[in-house]
Amino acid sequence: MRFKYLFILVASVIFLNSCDTARMATNDNLFVPYTKDLQDRVISSNLDVKKIQFFIDQKLVLRRTLGNQRSDIKGGQILFENGLYVHEVIIPKYTPGVCEGIDGDKISISFELKNNDLKFAPHGDPQGAFTLTARNWSSGTGEITYDNATYAVKCATCADVAVTKLLVKKSEARRLQTTQRVVHGRRVSN
């Protein structure tokens, strides 16, 4: 009898995990990377990039050590680690964001408040996908300015934050890539 219950429990866990994996795979199939080619099409078609809904493909963790300066925190999570306060801001995978502006080949995307943006550019990716930009790269992490403070940014779901891509929904990408013209026909003149 116990074996029967144990079998049912194990089968249930396997079934639930497979459902979760299928949902994640389906979610991944809804998005495509925002590329330099797609950006060029948006600009050449005179479309407003600020009306495009963007997403990121990885979970990001922004982290900075505060010492004893807890009073300047606006949002996020405060941890006490090794005698110091640490402030973390977490941006989950597929978090929606909006374009705050374009500067050359960089696009500024805000996932939270206005002026709290991350910069993406089509550097280093063979397909021209816009990936996260940062400075002072070290062991898969980088530094960014966020909320007027310097944060270390790391990828919680990958080894190197530099591979974090900017995404758009597939349907949005098709809409941006398709140009249409409706033919109204011709009439015979008498």
Image: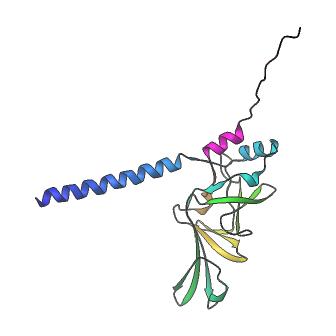
Name the residue at 82% across, 45% down.
46
| Residue furthest front in the image | 190
Placement of 37 over or under 70, stated as above or below: above
Q: Nearer the viewer, residue 25 or 98?
A: 98
In this figure, what is the number of numbered marks?
A: 0
The image quadrant that residue 185 belongs to is top right
Residue 118 coordinates in the image, percent (x, y): 69, 64
Residue 147 coordinates in the image, percent (x, y): 70, 75
| Residue furthest top in the image | 190
- Judged by its main secondary structure, the magenta piece is helix
Please give left or right for residue 143 compared with residue 79 in the image.
Answer: right
Please give left or right for residue 95 compared with residue 130 in the image.
Answer: left
Q: Nearer the viewer, residue 126 or 173?
A: 173
Placement of 141 over or under 71, stated as above or below: above
Placement of 172 over or under 58, stated as above or below: above
Q: Is residue 177 magenta?
A: yes
Q: Nearer the viewer, residue 140 or 60?
A: 60
User: If the image is split into quadrants, where does the N terminus sit?
Assistant: bottom left
Residue 92 coordinates in the image, percent (x, y): 55, 64
Name the residue at 71% across, 44% down.
38
Magenta-drawn segment: 169-179
Q: Is residue 88 magenta?
A: no
| Residue furthest left in the image | 1
Please give left or right for residue 115 compared with residue 94 in the image.
Answer: right
Residue 79 coordinates in the image, percent (x, y): 53, 83
The image quadrant that residue 58 belongs to is bottom right
Name the residue at 66% across, 43% down.
173
Placement of 83 over or under 186, stated as above or below: below
User: If the image is split into quadrants, where does the C terminus sit?
Assistant: top right
